[in-house]
Image: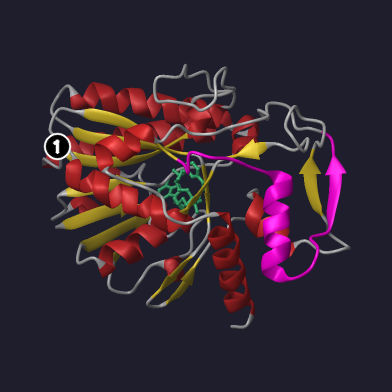
Protein backbone atom coordinates (compact mmCIF):
# COMPACT_ATOMS: atom_id res chain seq x y z
CA UNK A 1 0.00 0.00 0.00
CA UNK A 2 1.24 3.52 -0.79
CA UNK A 3 0.90 6.03 2.04
CA UNK A 4 1.07 9.81 1.73
CA UNK A 5 3.08 11.28 4.63
CA UNK A 6 2.53 15.03 4.88
CA UNK A 7 5.35 16.72 6.80
CA UNK A 8 7.59 13.73 6.01
CA UNK A 9 10.73 15.90 6.05
CA UNK A 10 10.18 16.85 9.71
CA UNK A 11 11.39 15.17 12.90
CA UNK A 12 8.53 12.73 13.47
CA UNK A 13 7.45 12.52 9.81
CA UNK A 14 10.88 11.52 8.48
CA UNK A 15 11.12 8.80 11.14
CA UNK A 16 7.69 7.54 10.05
CA UNK A 17 8.78 7.50 6.40
CA UNK A 18 11.94 5.50 7.15
CA UNK A 19 10.10 2.94 9.30
CA UNK A 20 7.20 2.60 6.82
CA UNK A 21 9.71 1.91 4.01
CA UNK A 22 11.57 -0.64 6.16
CA UNK A 23 8.24 -2.42 6.76
CA UNK A 24 7.44 -2.66 3.04
CA UNK A 25 5.06 0.28 2.51
CA UNK A 26 5.47 2.60 -0.48
CA UNK A 27 5.63 6.24 0.58
CA UNK A 28 4.97 9.64 -0.96
CA UNK A 29 6.07 12.71 1.02
CA UNK A 30 4.50 16.16 0.67
CA UNK A 31 6.46 18.84 2.50
CA UNK A 32 7.27 22.52 1.93
CA UNK A 33 10.42 22.16 4.10
CA UNK A 34 9.42 25.26 6.09
CA UNK A 35 10.66 23.54 9.26
CA UNK A 36 11.71 20.17 7.81
CA UNK A 37 14.80 19.09 5.89
CA UNK A 38 14.78 17.57 2.41
CA UNK A 39 17.88 15.46 3.23
CA UNK A 40 15.95 13.71 6.04
CA UNK A 41 13.65 12.08 3.47
CA UNK A 42 14.91 8.61 2.45
CA UNK A 43 15.69 8.47 -1.27
CA UNK A 44 13.30 5.56 -1.87
CA UNK A 45 10.31 7.75 -0.94
CA UNK A 46 8.65 9.84 -3.68
CA UNK A 47 9.13 13.47 -2.62
CA UNK A 48 6.82 16.30 -3.66
CA UNK A 49 7.90 19.77 -2.65
CA UNK A 50 4.78 21.80 -1.89
CA UNK A 51 2.29 22.99 0.68
CA UNK A 52 -0.84 21.32 2.02
CA UNK A 53 -2.48 24.67 1.20
CA UNK A 54 -1.95 23.98 -2.52
CA UNK A 55 -4.73 21.75 -3.86
CA UNK A 56 -2.75 20.92 -7.01
CA UNK A 57 0.24 19.69 -4.96
CA UNK A 58 -2.16 17.71 -2.77
CA UNK A 59 -3.78 16.02 -5.79
CA UNK A 60 -0.35 15.13 -7.19
CA UNK A 61 0.77 13.76 -3.82
CA UNK A 62 -2.40 11.70 -3.28
CA UNK A 63 -2.03 9.85 -6.62
CA UNK A 64 -2.00 6.06 -6.00
CA UNK A 65 -2.17 6.52 -2.20
CA UNK A 66 -4.57 4.43 -0.13
CA UNK A 67 -4.01 6.31 3.14
CA UNK A 68 -2.57 9.50 4.62
CA UNK A 69 -0.51 10.11 7.76
CA UNK A 70 -0.82 13.84 8.34
CA UNK A 71 2.08 15.38 10.29
CA UNK A 72 2.47 18.70 8.40
CA UNK A 73 1.77 21.57 10.77
CA UNK A 74 3.08 24.56 12.60
CA UNK A 75 3.77 23.29 16.11
CA UNK A 76 5.58 25.79 18.35
CA UNK A 77 3.28 26.91 21.17
CA UNK A 78 5.00 30.29 21.76
CA UNK A 79 5.04 31.13 18.05
CA UNK A 80 1.33 30.31 17.82
CA UNK A 81 0.62 33.04 20.39
CA UNK A 82 2.49 35.56 18.21
CA UNK A 83 1.11 34.31 14.87
CA UNK A 84 -2.35 32.80 15.47
CA UNK A 85 -3.50 33.51 11.88
CA UNK A 86 -0.56 31.60 10.40
CA UNK A 87 -1.32 28.65 12.70
CA UNK A 88 -4.99 28.71 11.70
CA UNK A 89 -4.13 28.91 8.02
CA UNK A 90 -1.62 26.02 7.94
CA UNK A 91 -3.12 23.72 10.56
CA UNK A 92 -6.85 24.21 10.04
CA UNK A 93 -7.21 25.49 6.46
CA UNK A 94 -4.37 23.22 5.24
CA UNK A 95 -6.11 20.17 6.74
CA UNK A 96 -9.46 21.31 5.30
CA UNK A 97 -7.91 21.28 1.81
CA UNK A 98 -6.27 17.90 2.45
CA UNK A 99 -9.62 16.41 3.52
CA UNK A 100 -11.38 17.93 0.49
CA UNK A 101 -8.82 16.47 -1.93
CA UNK A 102 -8.96 13.09 -0.18
CA UNK A 103 -12.77 13.06 -0.51
CA UNK A 104 -12.57 14.13 -4.17
CA UNK A 105 -10.03 11.40 -5.01
CA UNK A 106 -11.62 8.68 -2.87
CA UNK A 107 -8.77 8.34 -0.34
CA UNK A 108 -10.63 7.43 2.83
CA UNK A 109 -8.00 6.52 5.46
CA UNK A 110 -6.32 9.07 7.73
CA UNK A 111 -4.00 9.05 10.75
CA UNK A 112 -3.62 12.56 12.21
CA UNK A 113 -1.00 14.06 14.56
CA UNK A 114 -3.03 15.62 17.33
CA UNK A 115 -1.55 16.72 20.64
CA UNK A 116 -1.89 16.79 24.42
CA UNK A 117 -2.12 20.59 23.97
CA UNK A 118 -5.80 20.05 23.04
CA UNK A 119 -6.49 19.30 26.74
CA UNK A 120 -4.95 22.46 28.23
CA UNK A 121 -4.44 22.47 32.01
CA UNK A 122 -5.85 19.16 33.27
CA UNK A 123 -7.99 18.92 36.38
CA UNK A 124 -7.31 15.21 36.79
CA UNK A 125 -4.11 13.21 36.14
CA UNK A 126 -3.67 10.96 34.21
CA UNK A 127 -5.40 12.57 31.23
CA UNK A 128 -7.86 10.31 29.40
CA UNK A 129 -9.43 10.90 26.00
CA UNK A 130 -12.62 11.86 27.91
CA UNK A 131 -10.87 14.70 29.77
CA UNK A 132 -12.16 18.21 28.99
CA UNK A 133 -10.51 19.89 25.99
CA UNK A 134 -9.70 23.45 26.98
CA UNK A 135 -6.56 24.36 25.01
CA UNK A 136 -4.56 27.28 26.38
CA UNK A 137 -2.75 28.22 23.12
CA UNK A 138 -3.73 28.96 19.52
CA UNK A 139 -1.66 25.86 18.58
CA UNK A 140 -3.78 23.60 20.81
CA UNK A 141 -6.99 25.25 19.53
CA UNK A 142 -6.06 24.60 15.87
CA UNK A 143 -5.39 20.92 16.58
CA UNK A 144 -8.70 20.58 18.46
CA UNK A 145 -10.51 22.24 15.55
CA UNK A 146 -8.94 19.71 13.18
CA UNK A 147 -9.96 16.78 15.43
CA UNK A 148 -13.55 18.10 15.31
CA UNK A 149 -13.36 18.53 11.53
CA UNK A 150 -12.19 14.91 11.19
CA UNK A 151 -15.08 13.68 13.36
CA UNK A 152 -17.50 15.47 11.01
CA UNK A 153 -15.75 13.93 7.99
CA UNK A 154 -15.94 10.44 9.49
CA UNK A 155 -19.74 10.74 9.41
CA UNK A 156 -19.36 10.87 5.62
CA UNK A 157 -17.28 7.66 5.55
CA UNK A 158 -13.71 8.68 6.46
CA UNK A 159 -11.79 6.10 8.53
CA UNK A 160 -9.63 8.12 10.91
CA UNK A 161 -7.51 8.05 14.04
CA UNK A 162 -6.23 11.17 15.82
CA UNK A 163 -3.21 10.36 17.94
CA UNK A 164 -2.71 12.84 20.78
CA UNK A 165 1.01 12.85 21.48
CA UNK A 166 2.47 13.97 24.79
CA UNK A 167 6.24 14.80 24.64
CA UNK A 168 7.95 13.04 21.75
CA UNK A 169 11.68 12.41 22.18
CA UNK A 170 14.56 10.22 21.04
CA UNK A 171 15.93 9.51 17.58
CA UNK A 172 15.95 6.70 15.02
CA UNK A 173 19.04 5.09 13.51
CA UNK A 174 17.67 4.44 10.01
CA UNK A 175 19.44 2.57 7.19
CA UNK A 176 20.67 5.94 5.88
CA UNK A 177 21.73 7.34 9.26
CA UNK A 178 20.25 9.00 12.35
CA UNK A 179 16.96 10.90 12.09
CA UNK A 180 16.56 13.33 14.95
CA UNK A 181 15.10 16.66 16.09
CA UNK A 182 16.42 19.63 14.14
CA UNK A 183 13.95 22.37 15.05
CA UNK A 184 14.99 26.01 14.92
CA UNK A 185 14.44 27.34 17.47
CA UNK A 186 14.57 24.08 19.44
CA UNK A 187 12.02 24.24 22.26
CA UNK A 188 12.24 20.62 23.43
CA UNK A 189 14.00 19.69 26.66
CA UNK A 190 16.18 16.72 25.69
CA UNK A 191 18.01 18.11 22.63
CA UNK A 192 18.47 21.40 24.48
CA UNK A 193 19.90 19.93 27.67
CA UNK A 194 22.37 17.85 25.63
CA UNK A 195 23.65 21.08 24.04
CA UNK A 196 23.86 23.02 27.32
CA UNK A 197 27.24 24.40 28.39
CA UNK A 198 28.56 26.52 31.25
CA UNK A 199 28.40 29.55 28.95
CA UNK A 200 24.91 28.59 27.75
CA UNK A 201 23.18 26.67 30.56
CA UNK A 202 19.81 24.92 30.24
CA UNK A 203 17.00 27.17 31.46
CA UNK A 204 14.74 25.39 33.96
CA UNK A 205 11.41 27.23 34.07
CA UNK A 206 10.61 27.21 37.79
CA UNK A 207 11.69 24.95 40.67
CA UNK A 208 8.77 25.82 42.93
CA UNK A 209 6.01 23.78 41.28
CA UNK A 210 3.82 21.55 43.46
CA UNK A 211 5.81 18.40 42.54
CA UNK A 212 8.22 16.26 44.60
CA UNK A 213 11.38 18.07 43.37
CA UNK A 214 9.69 21.36 42.38
CA UNK A 215 10.15 20.99 38.61
CA UNK A 216 7.43 20.27 36.04
CA UNK A 217 6.53 16.69 35.18
CA UNK A 218 5.92 15.61 31.59
CA UNK A 219 5.19 12.30 29.85
CA UNK A 220 7.86 11.38 27.27
CA UNK A 221 7.38 8.84 24.46
CA UNK A 222 10.14 7.56 22.17
CA UNK A 223 9.63 8.52 18.51
CA UNK A 224 10.07 4.88 17.39
CA UNK A 225 7.36 3.67 19.81
CA UNK A 226 5.20 6.55 18.53
CA UNK A 227 5.58 5.45 14.90
CA UNK A 228 4.79 1.84 15.85
CA UNK A 229 1.45 3.19 17.14
CA UNK A 230 0.85 5.01 13.82
CA UNK A 231 1.37 1.80 11.85
CA UNK A 232 -0.93 -0.13 14.17
CA UNK A 233 -3.51 2.66 13.76
CA UNK A 234 -3.15 2.57 9.98
CA UNK A 235 -3.87 -1.15 9.99
CA UNK A 236 -6.91 -0.82 12.28
CA UNK A 237 -8.73 2.04 10.49
CA UNK A 238 -12.48 1.45 10.19
CA UNK A 239 -14.79 3.21 7.73
CA UNK A 240 -17.00 5.96 9.24
CA UNK A 241 -15.16 5.81 12.57
CA UNK A 242 -12.92 8.46 14.20
CA UNK A 243 -10.92 7.26 17.20
CA UNK A 244 -9.00 9.71 19.38
CA UNK A 245 -6.12 8.04 21.23
CA UNK A 246 -3.47 9.36 23.64
CA UNK A 247 0.17 8.41 23.08
CA UNK A 248 2.59 8.79 25.96
CA UNK A 249 4.34 6.39 28.30
CA UNK A 250 1.66 6.54 30.99
CA UNK A 251 4.22 7.81 33.49
CA UNK A 252 6.02 11.09 34.02
CA UNK A 253 9.49 12.44 34.63
CA UNK A 254 10.32 15.77 36.25
CA UNK A 255 12.74 18.13 34.51
CA UNK A 256 15.27 17.30 37.24
CA UNK A 257 14.86 13.55 36.65
CA UNK A 258 15.45 14.02 32.90
CA UNK A 259 18.55 16.13 33.63
CA UNK A 260 19.85 13.41 35.99
CA UNK A 261 19.24 10.71 33.34
CA UNK A 262 21.10 12.83 30.79
CA UNK A 263 24.05 13.42 33.13
CA UNK A 264 24.43 9.62 33.46
CA UNK A 265 24.33 9.17 29.67
CA UNK A 266 26.92 11.88 28.90
CA UNK A 267 29.02 11.20 32.00
CA UNK A 268 29.08 14.80 33.26
CA UNK A 269 26.76 17.33 34.93
CA UNK A 270 24.33 19.31 32.77
CA UNK A 271 24.80 23.05 33.44
CA UNK A 272 21.43 24.59 34.42
CA UNK A 273 19.99 27.96 35.36
CA UNK A 274 16.69 28.35 37.22
CA UNK A 275 14.43 30.97 35.65
CA UNK A 276 10.85 32.09 36.27
CA UNK A 277 7.88 29.83 35.56
CA UNK A 278 6.37 30.27 32.07
CA UNK A 279 2.72 31.26 32.20
CA UNK A 280 0.39 28.57 30.89
CA UNK A 281 2.76 25.70 31.80
CA UNK A 282 0.80 23.06 33.77
CA UNK A 283 2.73 21.46 36.68
CA UNK A 284 2.03 17.88 35.60
CA UNK A 285 0.98 16.30 32.28
CA UNK A 286 0.69 12.52 32.19
CA UNK A 287 -1.29 10.47 29.67
CA UNK A 288 -3.63 7.63 30.41
CA UNK A 289 -2.63 5.23 27.63
CA UNK A 290 -5.07 2.42 28.36
CA UNK A 291 -7.09 3.18 25.19
CA UNK A 292 -3.94 2.84 23.01
CA UNK A 293 -3.26 -0.51 24.67
CA UNK A 294 -6.85 -1.70 24.22
CA UNK A 295 -7.66 -0.39 20.72
CA UNK A 296 -4.23 -0.60 19.06
CA UNK A 297 -2.58 -3.31 21.16
CA UNK A 298 0.28 -0.81 21.64
CA UNK A 299 2.74 -0.78 24.52
CA UNK A 300 5.70 1.62 24.51
CA UNK A 301 8.95 -0.24 25.19
CA UNK A 302 11.63 2.49 25.34
CA UNK A 303 12.36 4.46 28.52
CA UNK A 304 13.81 7.92 29.27
CA UNK A 305 17.37 6.56 29.21
CA UNK A 306 16.80 5.25 25.66
CA UNK A 307 15.36 8.62 24.59
CA UNK A 308 18.31 10.59 25.99
CA UNK A 309 20.95 8.17 24.78
CA UNK A 310 19.53 7.95 21.21
CA UNK A 311 19.32 11.75 21.00
CA UNK A 312 22.91 11.98 22.29
CA UNK A 313 24.16 9.46 19.71
CA UNK A 314 22.30 11.26 16.90
CA UNK A 315 23.71 14.66 17.92
CA UNK A 316 27.24 13.25 18.04
CA UNK A 317 26.78 11.55 14.66
CA UNK A 318 25.68 14.82 13.00
CA UNK A 319 28.47 16.79 14.73
CA UNK A 320 31.09 14.38 13.35
CA UNK A 321 29.80 14.68 9.73
N1 LIG B 1 7.31 16.92 18.63
C1 LIG B 1 6.37 16.74 19.57
O1 LIG B 1 6.68 16.49 20.75
C2 LIG B 1 4.90 16.78 19.18
C3 LIG B 1 3.93 16.65 20.20
C4 LIG B 1 2.58 16.67 19.83
C5 LIG B 1 2.21 16.78 18.51
N2 LIG B 1 3.16 16.93 17.54
C6 LIG B 1 2.73 17.07 16.14
O2 LIG B 1 3.49 16.17 15.33
C7 LIG B 1 3.66 16.70 14.03
C8 LIG B 1 5.13 16.65 13.65
O3 LIG B 1 5.88 17.41 14.59
P1 LIG B 1 7.46 17.55 14.47
O4 LIG B 1 7.98 17.73 15.85
O5 LIG B 1 7.99 16.46 13.62
O6 LIG B 1 7.56 18.95 13.73
P2 LIG B 1 8.45 19.37 12.47
O7 LIG B 1 8.36 20.86 12.39
O8 LIG B 1 9.79 18.76 12.54
O9 LIG B 1 7.65 18.72 11.25
C9 LIG B 1 6.57 19.34 10.60
C10 LIG B 1 6.78 19.18 9.11
O10 LIG B 1 5.66 19.78 8.42
C11 LIG B 1 6.18 20.55 7.33
N3 LIG B 1 5.20 21.60 7.01
C12 LIG B 1 4.84 22.66 7.77
N4 LIG B 1 3.92 23.40 7.12
C13 LIG B 1 3.68 22.77 5.94
C14 LIG B 1 2.82 23.03 4.83
N5 LIG B 1 2.04 24.11 4.79
N6 LIG B 1 2.82 22.17 3.80
C15 LIG B 1 3.63 21.06 3.80
N7 LIG B 1 4.47 20.78 4.81
C16 LIG B 1 4.49 21.62 5.87
C17 LIG B 1 7.49 21.11 7.83
O11 LIG B 1 8.35 21.54 6.81
C18 LIG B 1 8.04 19.90 8.61
O12 LIG B 1 8.79 19.06 7.77
C19 LIG B 1 3.06 18.10 14.06
O13 LIG B 1 1.75 18.03 13.51
C20 LIG B 1 3.00 18.43 15.54
O14 LIG B 1 1.96 19.34 15.83
C21 LIG B 1 4.50 16.94 17.86
Q: Is residue 167 above or below residue 19?
A: above
- Residue at the far front: name it: 212
Is 119 within the magenta? no
Q: Residue at 74% across / 34% down in the picture?
A: 212
Report whether the residue tagged 1 is closer than 8 Å to ligand 1. no
Taking the image as shown, residue 15 lies to the left or right of residue 153, namely right
Taking the image as shown, residue 249 lies to the left or right of residue 237, namely right
x, y percent for residue 33: 46, 58
Q: Is residue 272 above or below residue 149?
A: below
x, y percent for residue 31: 39, 55
x, y percent for residue 282: 65, 28
Is residue 80 shown to the viewer in this render?
yes
Looking at the image, which is closer to me, 88 or 54?
Answer: 88
Looking at the image, which is closer to me, 279 or 313?
Answer: 313
Q: Which residue is mark 1?
A: 104
Q: Is residue 144 above or below residue 32?
A: above
Neighbor class of circle 1 (other Cα within 10 Å; few <14, some 14-19, many 20+) is few
Is residue 181 shown to the viewer in this render?
no
Looking at the image, which is closer to me, 43 or 316?
Answer: 316
Q: Looking at the rendering, which quadrant does residue 136 occupy?
A: top right
Q: Is residue 117 above or below residue 68?
A: above
Tell me which segment is drawn in magenta: 248-276
- Residue at the far right: name it: 199
- Residue at the far bottom: name it: 321
Taking the image as shown, residue 235 lies to the left or right of residue 269, namely left
Q: Residue at 65% across / 33% down in the picture?
A: 82
Where disc 1 sits, the SS reads helix
Amino acid sequence: MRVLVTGGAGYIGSTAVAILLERGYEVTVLDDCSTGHFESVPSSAKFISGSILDSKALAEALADCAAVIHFAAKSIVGESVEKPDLYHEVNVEGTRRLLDEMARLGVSKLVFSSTAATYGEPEIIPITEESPTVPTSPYGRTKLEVDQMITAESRLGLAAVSLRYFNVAGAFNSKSGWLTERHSPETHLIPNLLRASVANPLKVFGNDWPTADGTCIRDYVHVVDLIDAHILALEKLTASKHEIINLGSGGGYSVTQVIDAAAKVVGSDIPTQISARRSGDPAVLIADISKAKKVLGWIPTRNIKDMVSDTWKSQNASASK
